[in-house]
Image (cartoon, rainbow, N blue to C red):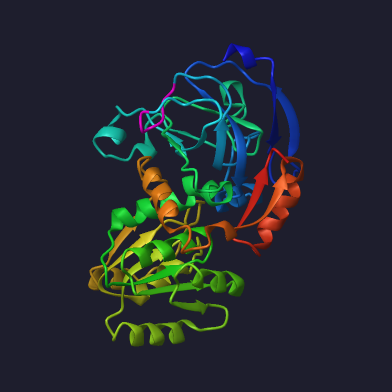
Amino acid sequence: MSAITQNYARIALFHGTDTPFEIQHIPIQDINNTVLVQVDLATICGSDLHTVSGRRNAEVPCVLGHETIGTVASTTTIHSADGKLLRIGDRIVWSLTTSCGVCHLCVNKNIPQKCETLFKYGHAQCVGENQLSGGFATHIQLKSGSTIFHIPEVITDVEAAPINCALATVINGLNKIETFPGETAIVHGAGMLGVYAACYLREQGYDIVVIVDKNSNRLQFAEKFGATHTFNSDIVSNDEISAQLKELTKNCGVDLAIEVSGSPSALPDLIEWLGIGGRCLTLGYVYPLENIPIHVHQLVTKCINLQGVHNYHPNVLKTALRFVEKNRIKYPFSELIGHIYPLSGIDAAFRRAFHQDAIRIGINPRL
């Protein structure tokens, strides 16, 4: 990569809560065993909002952004996970985390997304070789241990950008908790993860997929992605929801519950709505949240399986790509990103994202 060492990249530096992003020009370093990628599109994930709002700590300054896709920008000897040599111009997506493949967590626990030497894109302090490690920049350098896939030609940038976080996380969690055709499911949260969960469950043979949220617009949007019943928890009481769920499930209770909202009330409510032998998957509590009161008596007496899952096994990313490729005509994945801003407009992009009038807001550094 020595031919590009004099080139510069633009990055949007995050310095902390209530501080505007700083656009900087930095030289692109020549780092061995990395892949230089030109960022085509990045989306603002809910965890980015947690960081900017101060709900979650970050080592500053840093370049946020991890729901990202891009184009190989320099010659490399690195191959994709499918064994294909990466070439300049290839459209690619990569795992949210890196892993060593040899540690206890990678080998014995089979959770490489929690590797002992884990690196997570969009979460590292902007120093040394980590200056280009977030998606809110014109370039990103992919490190050794990243799992990289080519993006199928039919998948557009807008359809692809959220795959390597939101969709892969949902699929990984559902694989872990297991899905069974003919079951009933309830999803708490109609954001990106909730919408993805709805369509994925429908394709797994779920005839009843209920979504609960406080945002009416998002609930209406979820119906496009397979939600069969929706409840606005600001309008409909828990007792009313419970009564309707009993009717839907013939008094058996829901089989599978999925928490993707991060709301303190989500877990207690889902345990209440689950039937005997039910399973509860929680994915949304990605920021510190203490003292959630849950009905532990129901957890025990209903024989509920409670499963927390963080990030995803890198191989799931291929499954996520195939899912979008197969179902992109059936579900309007391209509508998930409401508006796309240039990198210079990142502050406005975050203000828009906090309004939550769109499922995702995008940032295109090429604009």
Q: Main secondary structure of the magenta part?
A: loop
**Number of callouts in the render?**
0
Q: Position of residue 192 (x, y in %)?
A: 52, 59
Tell me if I can see residue 188 in this picture.
yes
Can you tell which quarter of the image residue 295 is in? bottom left
Q: Is 157 drawn above or below residue 85 in the view shown? A: below
Tell me if I can see residue 122 in this picture.
no
Residue found at the far front of this picture: 154
The residue nearer to you, when weighing 221 against 349, is 221
Q: Position of residue 314 (x, y in %)?
A: 38, 40
Residue depicted at x 40% and y 53%: 323
Q: Position of residue 307 (x, y in %)?
A: 32, 57
User: What is the quadrant of the N terminus in the image?
Assistant: top right
Which stretch is magenta? 78-83
Residue depicted at x 34% and y 85%: 246
Q: Is 203 drawn above or below residue 138 in the view shown? A: below
User: What is the quadrant of the C terminus in the image?
Assistant: top right
The residue nearer to you, when weighing 313 against 92, is 92
Residue depicted at x 37% and y 67%: 202
The residue nearer to you, when weighing 155 against 243, is 155
Q: Position of residue 328 (x, y in %)?
A: 47, 57
Residue depicted at x 43% and y 76%: 228
**Is 353 on the left-hand or right-hand side of 69?**
right
Q: Is residue 91 magenta?
A: no
Residue found at the far top of this picture: 2
